[in-house]
Image (cartoon, rainbow, N blue to C red):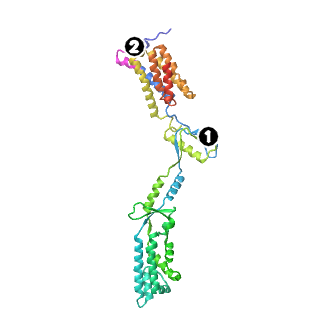
Amino acid sequence: MNRPSRSDREAAGVLSTPPERIWPDGLIHHGARILLLLGLAVLFTVLFPPDPAARVQSAQVGTVAQEDIIAEVPFSVPLTSAELQQARAEARASVPPTFDYLPQASDSMAARIARLLDRVQAAALTDTPTESVDEVLTAVSVELTDEQIARLTDPQTFDLIRRTAQEAASRILPEGVADSSELDEVSTGRVTVLSPGAGAGTSVDIEDIRNAREFSERAVELLPDGTPPDVQQILRILLFQNLEFSYRLNLQVTQQDRESVARAVPTTKQDVLAGEAIVRANEAVTEGIQERLAAHRAQLRERGRLDGEGGGARIPSLIGQTLLNLLLLGTFGLLVFFFRTSIYTRFRWILLVSLLIGVYAGGARIVVANAWPPEALPVAFVALAVAVLWDGRMALVLALSLGALTSVQPGLMGMAVLVPTTIGGATA
């Protein structure tokens, strides 16, 4: 038989006897145990990696899904660019435009007509009334025939037109008259009208607002019955030429209201929960399903969980999980170091405990892989072995430590695992 060499005997002695010197005996003695502890932490991380990468089956529109595709993470299906533009356009169209009410428009229009008619009246008293009146009207872009000028200079007709024009400006204009081009932009049944000093606007039916043509027709109705058509035409021409609108579109406020509503339009059209089926096996793939698959893939890619694009679990997650495992295992290691010195000193015993914990980790992986209940975790095996070899108090501490360690592993997290594990180990 080959006997152990002297160097082997010395190494075994350093590992299993209290070190007399920090260097190198202390480093070897404690370092070996720390390496075992770190190895167990890495083993748990390897068996239970955090955030495993996911595979997303691709499916084309018009094909049939080969298997169920379940959402790995919650995600939202965004609207396409065309859908978002259409939704925002519809939202803008639903906002009533805002008009400013101009109360001074009535007095201003009446004053303009009065000044014009005063000049016409003065021109009619000259030696050449027709030419003089035509010159006055042409200066303000009003064109009348000689017959119409003769009608206008008739004192009775003149007074009738003056009186009717003033009445139209004072009575009809305050009711609401707006430019036809601005009314054509209205896509709602009502508009908002802001009055000076009134604070909040009032809602007005679009049917109650007149355009220039409706205003002139309403003004003609003020003439006495039987008024000749040429007199009516003179009134229309004068009103159109001097019309001032009492409602003006407030483009700035309208745009602000419409844009605020457009910005409030949701950019997503569907929310999918984790665990929800995206498509079932043998189901035809539609455009909607394909959009959900694309959104699912984008969310997985953003989280670094897409197979082939994230490299599996991310490095920070792996390091964090390993440190957490090391912390929980280190708690048990410190208890052994301070309160079970004889066990800590013998490396063979520490190695045996480590092997028992490693066997437990492998058994827990089998339980998770087969979706067995947490009661199947082999914690009782470890607790019984430690209790038989050493004592029940150490076995109880190890069982509690393993319960806490197990409950933080991906796939085994939560009280549903912690309670049966700790109770089972304590009972054993």
Q: In this figure, which residue is indicated by the disc labeled 1?
A: 280
Residue 77 left/right relative to 133: right
Closer-to-camera residue (91/175): 175
Q: In this figure, which residue is indicated by the disc labeled 2?
A: 17
Residue extending furthest toward the bottom? 127
Q: Residue 362's mark?
A: none
The reply to whether the magenta stretch includes residue 142 is no
Q: Are marks 2 and 1 in contact (CB under 8 Å)?
A: no
Sequence order check, earlier mark of 2 and 1 = 2
- Residue 312 drawn above or below residue 181: above
Residue extending furthest toward the top? 1
Instruction: Report the span colored magenta.
Output: 19-31
Where does residue 113 sit, x and y in percent of width and height?
A: 42, 78
Where does residue 240 sit, x and y in percent of width and height?
A: 47, 76
Asked which quadrant contains residue 248, the reply is bottom left
Q: Is residue 28 visible?
A: no
Tell me the chief SS of the magenta region: helix
Q: Is residue 129 visible?
A: yes
- Residue 425 drawn above or below residue 318: above
Residue 372 left/right relative to 325: right
Badge 1 element: loop
Task: Please tell me how many numbered marks the rendered image carries.
Answer: 2
